[in-house]
Image: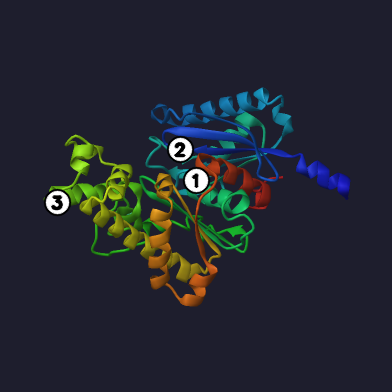
Amino acid sequence: MAKKAKAKSKKLVIGIDLGGTNVMAALVDTSGKVKSYVHFPTEAQQGPEHVIKNIADNVKALVKKSGLTMKDIWRVGIGSPGPMDSKKGIIIGAVNLPGWKRVTLKADLEKLLGVGVGVDNDANCAAYGEQWAGAAKGASNVVGITLGTGVGGGIIIDGRLVRGANYNAAEIGHTSLNPDGRLCKCGAKGCFEQYASASAIAESAREAIRKGASSMMTELVKGDLSKITSKTVFEAMTQNDKTAIAVWNEFIKYLAAGVGNQINGLNPEVVVIAGGVINAGEKLFTPLREAVRKQTFALTFSAAKIVPAKLGELAGAIGAAGVVINEGEFYNLK
Ligand SMILES: [Zn+2]
């Protein structure tokens, strides 16, 4: 028994996070520890065939550099933008990956690498990484929310990733917070990511200034409002800029509504918030927890910790490794 357990602990997998700009690939053991990693440009404009070949070449180089061969690699997991059929490993389309229409990512990578590959949604993988080896380690019911250009979501219930009827569950960023609100790129109105993403914070600041609000943010970007980011808002807020404070409070209000919906809907033990915005620390988390408390049932809220992510830019790659280690049967992996 002990010998068998030891053999399993030695198994190594590759976890990959495929983004529109960069790819992260990590060599990960079965406990979720990253042995080494590499990141490289996606070169998305060169089309799917090139992107997939480039990923395979970089994975092989990472394995070689680690003193291993592909025979030492048990499985490969890859998180990709969707929508997708994760069961078959087919990417149906991806906004940030030009030319990706029904790309057979699993089959193509398996052919190039000679190892079983599992494909899943990038945000699912990021949430799974935090649940398996990060901020929500040890918890069985977890919601992961990444605030970036958009809002990515992943849900783990009873220790298993929630994928849904055709594997497109957990699009938390496109749950509506305002049916009459801002038009989203998905075609719906008032989506979570239109109000509580990093780009939404910047957009709200621009909107306020355009409507005539005076703010030091205008000087911070030397009059070029397109240069306002969530960081600009945070910087101005910490210097008591009234407009920035109002924008930040508005952001917290919407984020709390979105997080509260997930808490009342799913009764999680942990909600992990990821993305650059978490660098705001307690200026984010203290008012967020307080606002969520007011939006949720007391008993449900009492079970839910709302915490910052721990794995940073490695979350997706670690999670992609985790799902193929722990849920290999879903991807038909041996
Ligand atoms: Zn949307």
Residue 241: assigned label: none
Q: Nearer the viewer, residue 97 or 5?
A: 5
Return the disc, 3 or 2, that comes first in the chain's sequence: 2
Give amino acid for label 2: Gly
Determine crowd level at label 2: few under 14, some 14-19, many 20+ residues with C-alpha closer than 10 A. some
For disc 1, the marked residue is: 122
Q: Farthest residue in the left direction?
A: 212
Across and down, in percent, residue 16 comes to 56, 38
Measure the C-alpha gap from mark 3 to mark 1: 38 Å
Give amino acid for label 1: Asp
For disc 3, the marked residue is: 213
Query: Is mark 1 in CB contact (under 8 Å) with mark 2?
Result: yes
Return the disc, 1 or 2, that comes first in the chain's sequence: 2
Q: Nearer the viewer, residue 176 or 215?
A: 215
Foreground label between 3 and 1: 3
Residue drawn where x is 66% and y is 27% of the image = 63
Determine crowd level at label 1: few under 14, some 14-19, many 20+ residues with C-alpha closer than 10 A. many
Across and down, in percent, residue 224 comes to 19, 36
Give amino acid for label 3: Ala
Residue 19: assigned label: 2
